[in-house]
Each structure stands twice: as C-alpha cells, then as structure tokens.
Image (tube, rainbow, N blue to C red):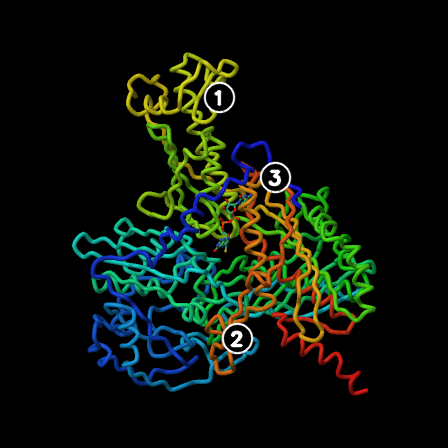
Amino acid sequence: MTTYQPTAGRFVGQSVPRREDPRLLTGKGRYIDDQSAKGMLHAHFLRSDVARARITHLDVSAARQAPGVRHVLTAKELNPHLAGSMLASMFADGGLGKVSPLRPLAEDDVRFVGDPVVLILADNRYLAEDAAELVEIDYEVLPPVVDYEQAEHSPEKVHAEEESNVVGQIEIPVDEGLQAIFDSAAHVVTETFHQHRYAHVPMETRGVVAGWDPHDRQLDVWISSQNPHEVRRACGRVTGVPEPQIRVRIGDVGGGFGQKSFTGREELTIVLAAHLLGVTIKWIEDRRENLIAGTHARVARVTAKMATDAEGHLLAAHVDHLEDVGAYSVGGGSASAGVCMMFPGPYRLPRLAWKSTVVWTNTCGRSAYRAPWMMETTAREQMMDVVARELGIDPLELRRRNVLHRSELPHTSAMGTVVENVSPEESLELAAEAIGYDAFRAEQAKAREEGRLLGIGLALYIEPQPNVAVYHNEPARMRIQPDGHVDVYLASGSHGQGLETTTAQLAAEFLGVHVDDVTVHQGDTESTPFGPGTGGSRSGPMIGAVIRQAAFRLKEKALAIAAHLLEAAPEDLTMEDGVISVQGTPARSVPLKEVAATAYHRAATLPPDIEPGLETLERYVAPPTMYSNACHACTVEIDPGTATVRILRYVVAEDCGQMINPAIVEGQVAGGVVQGLGGALFEHNVYDDDGNPLAATFLDYLIPTAGEVPIIEMHHLETPASTPGAFKGVGEGGAIGAPAAVFNAVADALAPLGIRVTDQPLDPSRLMALLAEASAPAAAG
Ligand code: MCN
C-alpha cells in the first residue's frame, strides 16, 4: 500500500520507466571491462599478505623476464613520479586537517593485508598474475594494530612517520551546566554499541583504463566512478598533467555505494604508471581484491549517555565516538563530526557534548559508504530503546514524547543546526500505524507465553543534504537543438540510481516538452560542465533545482521568440509537448523546432533584445543543509533453536519532499534497506588477531539474497523543501534506518530473557551465544 498520490506534474511525480533499464537488463551496458584500446596492457597488483611488516628483500627480476610481461614497477620506479596528493580534492585542497599518508605502492613497509607492493603489466591478466608468482619478497613481520579499541594507546604504529595512531580527536566537553543536568536528572542511562566492519560490494568492482599519448599529450581515462570531474582533478594532481589535457569518461557504473565517490589508490596508481610509461593500461579489480582492499566502511564504537526526566523527556546526552579508518582512509577524513553533529536527529535534545577519536589500524582503509555518518542513527535509535526499557516506557511512546512536531519547526538543534521542512512525527505515526504496532504488541504478548521470541523495532532519522561544502553547487548545460530536441549535460556520474531518467523527467516538466525528446549526457569531462558527482543523496535536490533553473531560462527565451513569431505577448503563451501556443487559441501556435531554427538559423530576424541560440549553462547554489526524514519499523521472530532471525514485516514511511519518480524512489529505499539489513544480519569483514582478512570471498562475506529479503512496504510523505522544485534526497536513507530498526526488533525479542544486545552483526553465532548465556544459570540450577 502506498499513501502517495502523484502530484500534478505531467512527468515529475510519475513513475516513468527507467530508460537505462532495457540496455542494462539485456546485457548491453558498457562497463569498464568493455573498454579496450590497441596495445593495451593488463595490470595486476601484487599485494602484501601480512598486515604490518618491513620489506627486507624485493626482487622482481624473474618476473620481468616472464612471458608476456612488459613492465614490472615497484615503489622505487613509480613513487618518485607522484606529482601531488592522491587524496580527494576536498581533502587535498585543505578541508579536514590531518589525513592518511597515501602513496602509490608500498615503499619500505606494508601496512595492511592487501597493500599494493608491485605493479605488473602484461599482455593479459593471466600472464601478469603468473609473473607475480616469480616476485621474491621477504618481510620482517611486525606486530599489527588490529583492534581499533587498543590503537590509541598501542606502542605499535601503523604509520611509522606519524606520532601515534590517532588521526584526530575533536571534542565539545561536558561543561558545568551539562554536568549539573546529568547530576540532577531523574534517569541517566549509559550504553556502548559497536558497529562492525562491512563492505560496499558494488556489483561491478572498481576498474580503470588509462592511456597517455606522449605525442598529442593527452591523458585518456575511462573509470568506474561516481564523480568524473573529481577523477580528472585527481589525475591532474598525481601526474602533473594540466587538466585540459585530461579526459575522463565513465560508462555505465555497476554500483558504487560511496566506494567510487573518491578516486581510489589503485586507479590513480594505474594512471600514474600509464603516464610514466606512455602506454594504455587496464586494471579490473577482482572480487577478492574488492573485499580485502577495495575500502571498508562503518567500523565505530559509540558510548552514549542520556539523561531524562521522570517521564522520559530527553534532557542531555554525551556521545563518546571512536572510529577506525584502517591504514589509509581514501575519503581522506572520517565521519566523526557528522556522527556527533547529527546525533540529536529528529528529537528535542536540549544539550549535547561529545568526543570523537579517529584511529589508524593495520586494516583496509575506510571510504564513504551509503550514509557514512549513519552511526549517529544506529547509536541514537538503539539508545532510545535501551532508555525505554530502563524506564519501563514503550519505545514508541518514548519517541512520541521526544519527537519534533511540525509546529516546533524550524528547530535549532543542540549543535546549532536548523532543522525544518521535515515530518518526523508524521513518519513515526505512519510507520507505527502501517505495521500495526499495538496489534503486534498484543500478538507478541501471546507469543511470549508460548515461548516464542517476537520483537518489534523502530528507527527514526533525519538525513542532511548537501552535507559537505563542495556539494553545495551543481551545474547543468541545456540546449534546445534546431530540431526541437533537448540535450542536457550533467556534471554528475550516475552509478545505478537512474539519473538518465529523472533528469529527462525534470527537463521535460519544466520546459514543456515530451520526456522522450530529452537526451541526458553525463560522465564525460570533455562535454559536461565542471561540478561534483553523486554522493550524499544530493542529486535529487541539486539536479532538480538546476534543471528547473535552466529549463525556466530557456523556456522564457523560447516564449519570447515565439511571441515575436506569433505576434503575441510572451505571457499569453504556453508550451506543451514542444508546441508553443496562445492560451485559449490553440490554433495560433508554433512548434519549438521552428522557434529553435529561428534562434540559430535566422538570428538576424530576432528582435534586438534577444540573443541568438537556445542554450544555457546554469549553476545552482544550495542554501544551508536541508533534511529528508523517515521512520523504519520492523518485526522479527527469532528461532531459539537455530538463533536465526526471520523478518516478519518491514515498513518504511519516508519523506524526500516532492518525488521526481516514485518508482525510482522506492527502488532507492528498497536497495538501501537491503544493504542495511545485510549489514546488520550477515555481512562482516572479519580480521583475525594477526590482521588477516577472513572474509575474502562471497562464501565468507555473506550478502543477503532474495530469500532473506522481506517485502518492503513503503509509504510516502511529501513535505516540500524550501529549495526550487522542493526535492530532497533519498538514496542513502534505507541504509541509515535499517540496521537500527532490525537491531531494536531483535533486542526487543530477546529482552524478556534478560539478554542485552549491543553489537552487530546479529548472526546466528552471536545470538546463539547470547541465548546460551541467558539459559546458563537456569541450566546450572
Ligand atoms: N529522486 C527522486 N525524487 C526525489 C529524490 C531523488 O526521484 N525527491 C531520485 C533521483 O533523481 C535519483 C535517485 O532518486 O535518480 C537518488 O537520488 P538522491 O537521493 O538525490 O541520491 P544521488 O543521486 O545523489 O545518489 C547518491 C546516493 C548515494 S550517496 C549512494 S551511496 C547510492 C545511492 O544514492 N549508491 C547507489 N543509490 C544507489 N543506487 C544504486 N543503484 N547504486 C548505488 O551505488
């Protein structure tokens, strides 16, 4: 059931079928591995198989003689040619302060299992991998820093050149006033939650084809990325080649989930090697590499302390956050500020203090992952349930007492952020009603009498967009061609979320042409305007706004030309399906193509105040952060014999403002929820104590399949944003709410047994151990 009623738009608000799907579903998509060039070499990285060590001996001479091998590069040959920072522009240019010291290939030491040591270039990948066997490499193995909770005070250092394993620490300390609140509060509840390590798992792994032509001095890069212009900047820095001599293209991208929002170390190493050698190189990451070295996500611990009055109204909180960014954080920084700033979420929380510590470990580095700061929701929403249990108040009721009401908006949070145009209370009530909260409680009580373990969980959140400074502007070029068709050029790189379709809908709606008459171009730095890519659920609001701006600009001009041709006033004209006519007199009309032909081919006949052509380049600059919001509700049953979790029902009540394409919105929510559930229940990038990754294949790294995924019931609210078009983002939301919702449902199911759940994943081994622990005293007795 869906409560959404399409809004008036002819194309916006309609579930227009995704135009990219016929191509993708019939295997006609063009991914990185589909790209090739004459004489192209194939790359293989020989990676460290120890977590921390000094390289004592490295001999690649035999590998260089191997059949089909063209080049073997070590740090000695390649790294001196690095012209500038490998970090993402927003960090390389300043930004977050201290960052991970990133280098192309490992120099004297290796810092995690998977650290690239040697780059082998051969006629094909098989020959390159065969040659890797001939590389002689000896290590003096050192004790690795694997446990991030011990990293801060460990005598062992991940980066020998750094003072410690602490990347950074920021704090808003508890002041006297806050301490007084904690001292006098009716209840103070403290709990610690661990968020485990998991991975992005894009269907298409990372990959690049990079070529440098020394004669026309052109660097040509095809890459699987969310952000072509960011890639071009990074390639320029790394090689020293001026950006106008660099062309970056992306084709179809088989998912990114944040892993492809920044340019990866391996991709830049390939670009550097191609430039150095004057060759074209292809590198396609294999699944094992992606799981052990393709960047990880999420690893964090939060200890939350919450003070409430006697009725459970929140008074204050303190958050102690610790985050592991592995050996090299590709995104440059961490999510620490986001986690703490966002902690108040959709609630009235008058005071907040926090401390966040970010550490390096000898594990795969971190990168952004679908809502990188989501630990704020995970910790807060899990904490709301802990507080509710402690106070003997139902979790729904506790949320009702604290959730922001529409009448309180705009609301300035304890962190000074202004929250408005959101519907947390409505989404909470909608989700509670849709899942039949009260009826489930009754059913649960009965089931408990029969010894069955049923639970219900809620998770409520708000999601900021745009969430970093560079994301605050968005360009688009729009051209009405002389034949009346419309070309739109985007800076972004769609990586699965359907921008080809939604952008065409937006242009058609705001211009007054048919959606089939709009062609969307993206992913080529040579033809598209400079700008940030997709990330932070920004394209809905940002592309929505800039396309509207561009369409209105061109429409105004087209109407002015048509007014001249029809001898009418522009304000009396309308445009629909590419025909401009006088309102009320449809016979007096002129097709857009006639207007366009006049604008280009008969420019001399235009009135003097109208410039020739029908083309515009617009740049939209966003106001301060806006928010979308949602509530997830989940019911589960746990089998006490196998300790498996069965999701009975899953409900999402979301609000992303005006939906451009409801079917795409629902696809986005569903995808995010599946990732969130997978993370909470199955996925885990486990390391052993020596820093060996134990989940290097899909046999060990379990992602959910159709069999484990419940039907996701969706409900929509549409609170307009104050921005042009009123669109808010939705791409990450599912992944934000799902882990806490299912966690709370599992904790609720186990609560009558006295079981306290604090950590994920909620896999059978963890739950079996908790069940065994709970029954141990009874068994003993
Ligand atoms: N949309 C809409 N109506 C709205 C808001 C958005 O119809 N009110 C549409 C947009 O036009 C777009 C899609 O929904 O087609 C997602 O838009 P948005 O929420 O703005 O997010 P972005 O386009 O900026 O995409 C990034 C976001 C993030 S951060 C990750 S990570 C992510 C994601 O979305 N990775 C994805 N969705 C993904 N979907 C797929 N298939 N694969 C990924 O790797």
Q: Residue at x 59, y 45 (%)?
A: 656
Residue 332 occupies quadrant: bottom left
Spatial separation of the CA atoms under disc 3 and disc 1: 25 Å
Q: Which residue is mark 2?
A: 686
Q: Determine whether 446 is above or below 50 in the image.
A: above
| Residue 322 coordinates in the image, percent (x, y) | 58, 69
Q: Position of residue 189 (x, y in %)?
A: 74, 67
Identify the residue position indicated by label 1 in the image. 574
**First in sequence: mark 2 vs mark 1:** 1
Residue positioned 65% across, 71% down in the render: 644
Tell me the SS state at disc 2. loop
Separation of residues labelled 2 and 1 (CA atoms): 61 Å
Question: Which secondary structure lies at badge 3?
Answer: loop
Depth check, mark 3 against mark 2: the one in front is 2
Q: 10 Å neighbourhood of mark 1: few (<14), some, or many (≥20)?
A: some
Q: Is residue 648 left or right of residue 480?
A: right
Of badges 3 and 1, the one in the foreground is 1
Local packing at callout 2 (Cα closer than 10 Å; few below 14, some 14-19, many 20+) is: some
Q: Which amino acid type is marked by label 2? A: Val
According to the picture, the residue beneath numbered tag 3 turns out to be 720
Q: Amino acid at mark 3?
A: Pro
Q: Looking at the image, which residue is at 67% across and 71% down?
A: 758
Q: CA distance from mark 3 to mark 2?
A: 42 Å
